Amino acid sequence: MENNVKSYRKPYVRPVKANWWTDRGFYIAYMIREATAVLAVVVALELLVLSCLSAESVTAFLKNPLVIIVNILSLASVMYHTITWFNLMPKAVRMFATKKPTDTKLIPAKLIVTAEWIGAAIAFAVIVLACTCLV
């Protein structure tokens, strides 16, 4: 269905500053959380490079101080992203039956505990696989 009504009125376009996100703390946290994706891309590219190298080259590459610093920064940024996302999620999710916001303290705790258990299970699986490959 097409709108055939002509309007000679100019639409109002509100001016937006380039640093609009510096006005509120919530926006700053949002922009920092979104910027953590840059370091995630760096780690993905690092894994792509590592897949093309031999075992000796991988060890030498991972011992490089710059790579260690980038990996530590990437880990910190991913942890920041995860914690802020877990804290933000209950505010965005609503219960389907009651249409009321969920308990904002209960869900992040459950998600963090679940993430810890999943991380421990993955670490255990990696250790077991590494031990079986070395034998």
Image (spheres, rainbow, N blue to C red):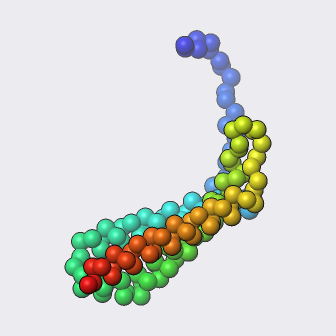
User: From what the image shows, is residue 32 above or below residue 3?
Assistant: below
Q: Position of residue 25 (x, y in %)?
A: 74, 62
User: From what the image shows, is residue 101 above or below residue 33?
Assistant: above
Picture quarter containing residue 26? bottom right
Picture quarter containing residue 43? bottom left
Residue at 75% in and 38% down: 99
Q: How many marks?
A: 0
Q: Nearer the viewer, residue 51 or 23?
A: 51
Q: Is residue 78 left or right of residue 10?
A: left
Residue 130 visible in the displayed image? yes
Residue at 44% in and 75% down: 124
User: From what the image shows, is residue 102 above or below residue 67?
Assistant: above
Q: Position of residue 38 (x, y in %)?
A: 48, 64
Q: Is residue 26 left or right of residue 127?
A: right
Q: Nearer the viewer, residue 126 or 55?
A: 126
Residue at 24% in and 76% down: 53
Q: Position of residue 42 (x, y in %)?
A: 42, 69
Residue 57 visible in the displayed image? no
- Quadrant into which the N terminus falls: top right
Q: Nearer the viewer, residue 21 or 121?
A: 121
Residue at 36% in and 83% down: 62
- Quadrant into which the C terminus falls: bottom left
User: From what the image shows, is residue 1 above or below residue 33?
Assistant: above
Q: Position of residue 128 (x, y in %)?
A: 37, 77
